Amino acid sequence: MEKCRHVLPGEHIYKGRLFFGYTPPEVLDAVLDFEVRDDDIFIVTYPKAGTTWLQEVAWLIVNDGNVGKAKGQQVYFRSPFLEFKDLVLNEVGLEIAESLTSPRVIKTHLPVDLVPSRMFQTKCKKLVLFRNPKDLCVSYFHFYRSSSSFGNFQGSWSEFLEMFLNGHVDHGSWFDFTKGWWSKKDNSDVLILFYEDMKKDLKSEIRKISDFIGKSNVTEEMVARIADHCSFENMRTNPMTNHHDVYSIDREISPLLRKGVVGDWKSLFTAEQAEYFDSVYSEKMEGINVPFQYYI
Ligand code: A3P
């Protein structure tokens, strides 16, 4: 397949990574100096890995399974997006994070070298969620189509696939992100999670996260309550998690909670594209064995 370079309105490059206007250079500079607290919990994901899902799960674990409180405020205010700045609404992730009481649950999509330097100098916990890159790429394509944040992208699936494999997408290369964070997997403050494991057994992942962040009062009843609140159907219909109020997302084109399944990549990938993807993957991920699951 031919290599191509799509330049969309609003793109900029910061330290070799592509970003759009909602992540301006001055915010990325400020993120590096962000005051991390010892008891912060970071949700670290590449876009479309299931970020919102893990934000809601982690926030509820931290907040003793208080679903009533979770239903009272948008997830993006309870768990701010660190590098986000919306000039229209005057919402700045850094400011929201600074205003929160501890322990905070903070979302970032940044590669490991662009996160706050204090993230590795404090005892803060990093929950790193991965998703198999074929499903993630399909999910990202639909998000690019539905969101006005990405220069009003009107391209085709095959164009997007090429952009994705070349790292010409928002927040830069998935390969770069994945290799960087995977290299931190043995750090005692890093927990690697997989979307597919959450799909297979959410309760078990809730227990794993609770143990990791040192939450000792999590009962089985609380685990069940969190799992129920965070089911795909419940989050899809919950106005505090489904992002229906987010003006930049046209949910008629594709809602944030779209299908929520493993294996949807088959709906768009042709056999030739899957083979091409696998060959690029083998080349770029040589020597790195991340146990991705493409089917469950
Ligand atoms: P699909 O587009 O494949 O449906 P992010 O929050 O990182 O943008 O990720 C969005 C993806 O996570 C979407 O994938 C969305 O449906 C999925 N997702 C969100 N909440 C989920 C849940 N409770 N269960 C399963 N998948 C969920």
Image: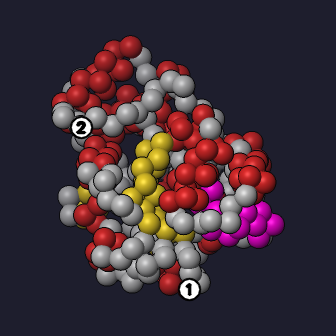
Quadrant assignment, res 214:
bottom right
- Asked if marks 2 and 1 touch (Cβ < 8 Å), the reply is no
Sequence-earlier tag: 2 or 1: 1
Q: CA distance from mark 2 to mark 1?
A: 39 Å
Looking at the image, residue 226 sits to the left or right of residue 50; the answer is right
Q: Residue at x 60, y 34 (%)?
A: 200
Mark 2 sits on what residue? 288
Viewport quadrant of the C terminus: top right
User: Taking the image as drawn, is residue 266 in sight?
Assistant: yes
> Badge 1: how crowded within 10 Å, few (<14), some, or many (20+)?
few
Pinpoint residue 270: horizontal percent, then vertical percent.
Answer: 41, 17
Q: Residue at x 63, y 56 (%)?
A: 57
Q: What is the span of residues highlighted in magenta in the rendered image? A: 57-71
Q: Report if residue 69 lies within the magenta region.
A: yes
Label 2 CB sits under 8 Å from any ligand 1 atom: no
Q: Amino acid at mark 1?
A: Ser
Q: Which mark is residue 59?
A: none
In front: mark 2 or mark 1? 2
Looking at the picture, does residue 243 appear above or below residue 135? Answer: below
Pinpoint residue 197: horizontal percent, then vertical percent.
Answer: 54, 38
Q: Main secondary structure of the magenta part?
A: helix
Choose between 45 and 26: the one closer to the eye: 45
Pinpoint residue 29: horizontal percent, then vertical percent.
Answer: 29, 77
Q: Residue at x 28, y 43 (%)?
A: 175
Mark 1 sits on what residue? 99
Helix, strand or loop at label 1? It is helix
Q: Residue at x 76, y 70 (%)?
A: 69
